[in-house]
Image (tube, rainbow, N blue to C red):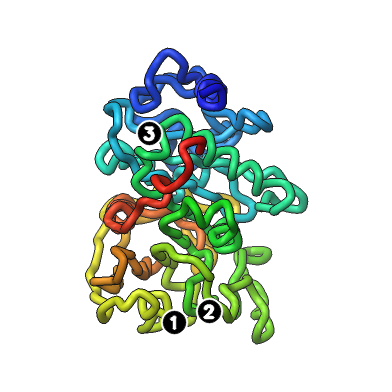
Amino acid sequence: MIRKLMTLAAFGLLGATPAMARDVDGVACTTPQVARCVGEACIPAMANLGNATDAKTGRKFFLDYPCDLKPGEKVTFILNIHGAGGIGNWQRHYFPAVDYVNKHRLVIATPTAATANPVRRWVAEADDAHLQNITDQVFAAFGARNIRAMWLAGHSQGGFTSNRIVCTDYFQARVDGWLSLSGGRIGAAPFVSAFGPPGPGGAPPAPRPPGSGPPGMGAAPPACDFSHIFAIGEYEISALPEISPWAEKYGCAKRVRREVVDEEPGYVWDYSRHGYKVWGMKAGSGKAEVFEYPKCKEGRVVADVVRIDKGHTEGLEPNVTEAIVKLMVSAKGGKARTLPAAD
């Protein structure tokens, strides 16, 4: 009880039951959520590191959730992790699941990595405990029994970080799914040889030697159970495989294709380095191909999403974002409910 009260105090939630929380660290729960922006207007907003605080380290992060949660209501928790060179508030706009916290009953925590030299990126020694602290606080504030599923969502190096931690003792006991946003696929989908940010004048980077380039998933698949969604820009990879070893693991049926069309663009892009299509252009409308492997055992979800005419950094459009969110909330959950009561 003392631990839970300390967590609620850190969130600014004392005086309300966890499921009826109205304030987060002194910031009122609002619809739409705090610190929202579009396009170049997001540049100054990146200085805002969040509306909630890691009680153990004092580091800020964003916490978004429905303002009208009812006692005992079940939610899906997403830990949303940015890529190298990114920041938490950019990630909230790159994968804007926060737009659907009310409709799909989501709780989303979006932190910022500590290490910023030479670029901001996730480092085990500096950040793993922070990610665990945030998860502990969310579970305590909203109730582990009320978290129907937990997902890691990571872009680029945040995706590689998600892959690195998903089967650690701490996270494999809690995580029900991993969404990789241009952060590697279980069952290789190799990056193109000239992957990377553009050079001077927008020139493509030099092709990388065979076998080099961004880290992949490695030869051995992860050794724990979770659902897996892989989302990628068409120009980032040489080809999307037609089969998935993760789908085979869960006995899924043959993949089914559907198309998602977006007339609205995403919120953000790489403002200083757009112009090379592999890295990403200015955010725009578009369409995506969703390849789902249906009827997986244990209620798992396995799917690939290819964003047509997109690269690495254009923010996800609203319809494709919701299509991914729908897949996430449809997947099996329940790991959190098996944790000891103290968690």
Taking the spot 53% from the left edge, 19% from the top edge, the residue there is 9
Q: Closer to the N terminus: mark 3 or mark 2?
A: 3
**Direction top: furthest residue:** 15
Label 3 close to label 2 by CB (< 8 Å): no
Q: Which residue is mark 3?
A: 65
C-alpha distance separating marks 1 and 3:
37 Å
Looking at the image, the residue that sits furthest to the front is 340
Q: Position of residue 272 (x, y in %)?
A: 59, 52
Q: Where residue 126 appears, x then y in whole percent?
A: 72, 46
Q: Which amino acid type is shown beneath numbered disc 1?
A: Ala
Q: Which residue is rendered at x = 50% and y = 79% of the image? A: 188
Q: Which residue is mark 1?
A: 239
Instruction: Report helix, strand or loop for mark 2.
Output: loop
- Horizontal side of 117 relative to 176 (left or right) equals right
- Distance of mark 3 from mark 2, alpha carbons? 35 Å
- Which corner quadrant of the image does residue 113 belong to? top right
Few, some or many residues within 10 Å of mark 3 (<14, 14–19, 20+) = many
- Which residue is depicted at the point 57% across and 78% down? 220
Left or right, 109 with reference to 205? left
Please state which of the two labelled residues, at mark 3 or mark 2, is closer to the viewer.
3
Precedes in sequence: disc 2 or disc 1 = 2
- Type of the residue with mark 2: Pro
Question: Which quarter of the figure has residue 29?
Answer: top left
Establish if 229 lies above or below 77. Answer: below
Q: In the image, residue 1 lies at what x, y percent?
A: 51, 24
Mark nearest the camera among 1 and 3 is: 3
The residues tagged by marks 2 and 1 sit, at their Cα atoms, a distance apart of: 7 Å
Q: Is residue 157 visible?
A: no
Residue picked out by circle 2: 190
Q: Residue 160 appears at what percent x and percent y?
A: 58, 63
Which residue appears at 33% of the width and 40% of the height? 75
Contact between marks 2 and 1 (CB within 8 A): the answer is: yes
